[in-house]
Image: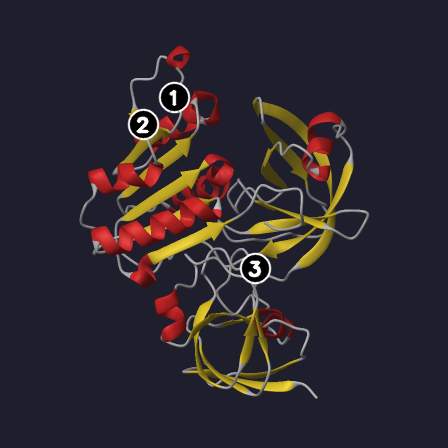
Amino acid sequence: MPFQISLEPGGQRFSAAEDQTILEAALAAGLVLPYGCRDGACGACKGKLISGEVDLGTVSAGALSDADRAAGMTLFCRAHARSDLVLEARNVSRAGAIPVKKLPCRVQRLTRAAPDVMVIEAKLPASEAFRFHAGQYVDFLLADGRRRSFSIANAPHQGDHMELHVRLVPGGQFTEHVFSGLKERDILRFEGPLGSFGLHEDSARPIVLIAGGTGFAPIKSIIEHALHVGLTRPITLYWGARNRAGLYMDGLARSWESALPDFRYIPVLSEADPADDWHGRSGLVHHAVIEDLPELSAYEVYACGAPAMIDAARRDLIERCGLGADDFFADAFTFASDPAR
């Protein structure tokens, strides 16, 4: 028999089978809980277990700390119900405004933006509208049933195509195909849009955006959306990469300083080569944020990148800069040959 799950303070109810995560069951019932990676890495789906028992799979310590566990918190993307549950979950919405679809797309252009970064521009079907929010991602559906997740890099108003930034992963079945076998006019199938990462447009707080590597993709979508809607909130973008080639759209990022009011762009290299002739910031990207903005209690931070970067940024910005725990929003993803994002 499925378990019955109640959400507070909204009072929503749904059922979950034993083999479903809480997030999967909620989405199947038409309820959208905040979520991002679906892999226990980003912490976007964290909520409180008020009553009942769950089985929690492997999660990142940064996404769910020992203190979180002691306070009764869990991650809905990894937790399986083992009894009826009462959960505290905020910002729950009803699905339907933007439906998740499975669609084909045609590769329109392939651009090698860096030695290990390919930009795919994919044409969407003219016969069926595909809508999304800035910051969301799609899953490419592979022939063997596996999936690969990539954030949409263009803004929603550019709705006739999708732009994806693909980093080459040695041994990665899909990414190696993108770099060595994929051709213009090839057809790919995808499911989306997915994830709840995105700008909270109802807030007036200044914004800090932190991108690591191709974590720049959803940040690009958010900034281009901000340009489109005329957002006037102060925005500071920190983009971290290993070397200068990793800042593969540096010119575009610099152009936003003149296009958006009160916008700053700070590139940061962690392994700057002398041949790069680099005179900018160096070190860990979130350390640059701490140096520039030691007091973040009035800010919102949006971070996209690998789980280790997300974990460190979340911990240090909250503990050292006074950032509110509820004001850190993240999209964490892995660069691996397995299906994890």
Q: Which residue is mark 3?
A: 38
Q: Is residue 60 above or below residue 259?
A: below
Q: Which residue is mark 2?
A: 282
Closer to viewer: mark 1 or mark 3? 1
Q: Secondary structure at mark 3?
A: loop
Q: Which residue ends up furthest to the right in the rendered image?
A: 143
Type of the residue with mark 1: Ala
* Residue 127 appears in the picture as rendered: no
Q: Which residue is mark 1?
A: 272
Q: Give percent across and percent down for residue 235.
A: 30, 42
- The front one of 207 and 324 is 324
Of mark 1 and mark 3, the one earlier in the sequence is 3
Q: Are marks 1 and 3 in contact (CB under 8 Å)?
A: no
Q: Give percent across and percent down for residue 249.
A: 46, 27
Q: Secondary structure at mark 1?
A: loop
The residue sitting at 36% across, 44% down in the picture is: 209
Q: Give percent across and percent down for residue 150.
A: 60, 44
Q: Are marks 1 and 2 in contact (CB under 8 Å)?
A: yes
Of mark 2 and mark 3, the one earlier in the sequence is 3
Q: Quadrant of residue 151?
A: top right
Q: Is residue 124 above or below residue 39?
A: above
Type of the residue with mark 3: Arg
Marks 2 and 3, Cα distance to the nearest angstrom?
Answer: 31 Å
* Residue 237 appears in the picture as rendered: yes
Type of the residue with mark 2: Ser
The residue sitting at 67% across, 28% down in the picture is: 109
Marks 1 and 2, Cα distance to the nearest angstrom?
Answer: 7 Å
Q: Are marks 2 and 3 in contact (CB under 8 Å)?
A: no
